[in-house]
């Protein structure tokens, strides 16, 4: 996975969920807004402190995570 520098993890921010540049905006929030039909421009209007690249990286991160496979470990 390419380096997504705008996606951050901090246990003190939103319980450690992946966020945009350390802000209290999670990748899940962005994905949910886009999935509900909002355009990137509408999301930017709702969150004026975000940048277009923030949204694109959030979508890239979510797509990457969706492709991961979980393999159960035999105990």
Image: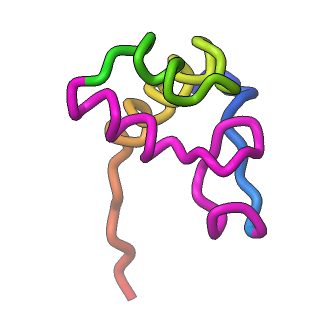
Q: Is residue 42 above or below residue 27?
A: above
Q: Nearer the viewer, residue 1 or 43?
A: 43
- Farthest residue, direction bottom: 75
Q: Which x, y percent locates residue 11? A: 74, 68
Image quarter in which the C terminus is found: bottom left
Q: Is residue 51 above or below residue 12?
A: above
Q: How is the image coloured?
A: rainbow
Q: Which x, y percent locates residue 9? A: 71, 52
Q: What residue is drawn where x is 57% and y is 29%? A: 47
Q: Quadrant of residue 72?
A: bottom left
Q: Which x, y percent locates residue 26? A: 55, 47
Q: Quadrant of residue 54?
A: top right
Q: Which residues are magenta?
A: 12-37
Left or right: where 57 falls relative to 21: left
**Residue 18 part of the magenta-drawn span:** yes
Q: Which x, y percent locates residue 13? A: 72, 62
Q: Quadrant of residue 17?
A: bottom right
Q: What residue is drawn where x is 32% and y is 40%? A: 32
Q: Is residue 71 above or below residue 51?
A: below
Q: How many marks?
A: 0
Q: Is residue 57 above or below residue 70?
A: above
**Residue 19 part of the magenta-drawn span:** yes
Q: What residue is drawn where x is 42% and y is 41%? A: 65
Left or right: where 57 falls relative to 75: right
Q: Nearer the viewer, residue 49 or 54?
A: 49
Left or right: where 53 falls relative to 55: right
Q: Nearer the viewer, residue 53 or 40?
A: 40
Q: What residue is drawn where x is 57% and y is 27%? A: 1
């Amino acid at each position: 996975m390419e380096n997504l520098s705008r996606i951050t993890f901090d246990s003190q921010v939103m319980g450690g969920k992946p966020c945009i540049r350390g802000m209290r905006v999670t990748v899940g929030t962005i994905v949910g807004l886009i999935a509900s039909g909002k355009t990137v421009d509408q999301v930017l209007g709702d969150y004026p402190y975000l940048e277009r690249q923030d949204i694109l990286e959030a979508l890239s991160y979510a797509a990457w995570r969706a492709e991961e496979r979980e393999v159960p470990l035999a105990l």
